Image (cartoon, rainbow, N blue to C red):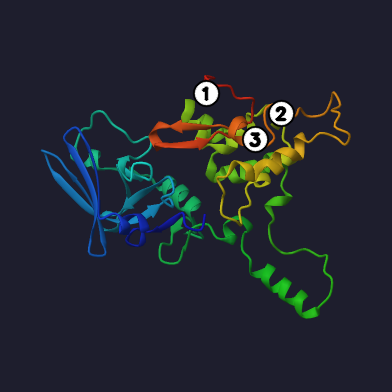
Amino acid sequence: MALTSMRAPSSTVLLTHSQLQFSTGPFHYAIRMDGSVPRYEMSSPAKNLSDTLVWAFGTGRVGQSYLFSPKGAGFRESRVTYFSSLQNLGFTPTRQFTTVDSPEEAMYREVPAKEVQLCFGCHTTAAFTGARLDEENLFLGITCEACHGPGSKHVSTMQAVALADTDYAGPRQIFSPASLSPMDAVDFCGACHATTWDVILSGIKGVSNARSEPYRLQLSKCWGKGDARLVCWSCHDPHKQITSAPQSYDHVCVNCHARPAGGERASTAPRTCPVASSACVSCHMPKVYVPEMHFNFTDHKIRVARSGDAFQ
């Protein structure tokens, strides 16, 4: 999360790919480094356009998208995105077109002010003073204060405790997401990773929703009306790099599905798996291919998944 935004000239993706390209119909796109300047170009029979990329969002593990700002007047989103599975460009997710009215529309999409707030709100920290974007003083990526709020009082309090060299059970002067109810906890992460309402209001249907992990988790039968054992940080420690090894999540599954002492399962106890005893998520949270992302995402709807099942 700390690497989820960067100024485009510092993007490792752009620095390690001398020229990225994509073509569709009469339109040809390229992103290349002109010295230390990342240039975005779109050529067509009607007109050739180019501009300097300013911001890059995404680590590049799955993909990376770009913003530019002609003469510093508002932001435009490039029509193309880098995808790691392609090692090249493709249409920015949900931005594919079949027909366009102008070369400008083929090159970019103007980003409304409210969407700018969402982009920087989820990819940077302390980006806004009121409603004003402060590009010079924001913090790149998601830092501690993005989740815990301002930390100066917390630091002062804990320094005083350390100097006093005594036990302290008072307030820590910092917000702890761990204090949230299960529903609020998942929605807290969903502020950037998509809540149920985000999905409903966006109107996105089908397998594309596999990207909305909080929404999919809440569709799980075992989620019920909220289970404290099934919040996001039950599996993912936000202070550590995410792991993709299925076995690394087994201890979380066993926390609910372990057999009681003696090996007998009471009729009210959670069911144990008759097929395997490890890598639970590989079967019960299978990966699904999201076409617009050119990537396999773990579907966070926990279930007994069977080969050939339709995505629901």
Label 2 sits on what residue type?
A: Cys
Residue 98 position, x and y percent, is 26, 28
Q: Nearer the viewer, residue 160 or 15?
A: 15
Q: Is residue 203 visible?
A: no
Disc on the earlier residue, 3 or 1:
3
Label 3 sits on what residue type?
A: Cys
Disc on the earlier residue, 2 or 1:
2
Q: CA distance from mark 3 to mark 1?
A: 19 Å
Residue occupied by mark 2: 273
Q: Is residue 134 visible?
A: yes
Image point 84% across, 26% down: which residue? 268
Q: CA distance from mark 2 to mark 1?
A: 22 Å
Q: Nearer the viewer, residue 284 or 8?
A: 284
Label 1 sits on what residue type?
A: Phe
Given this view, does label 2 or label 1 mark the residue nearer the observer? 2
Counting the numbered discs, the total is: 3
Given this view, does label 3 or label 1 mark the residue nearer the observer? 3
Residue occupied by mark 3: 280
Image point 56% across, 31% down: which residue? 286
Disc on the earlier residue, 2 or 3:
2
Above or below, 212 relative to 31: above
Q: CA distance from mark 2 to mark 3?
A: 9 Å
Residue 294 position, x and y percent, is 39, 36
Q: Secondary structure at mark 2?
A: loop
Instruction: Indicate left or right for 289 with 218 as reference.
Output: left
Q: Secondary structure at mark 1?
A: loop
Residue occupied by mark 1: 311
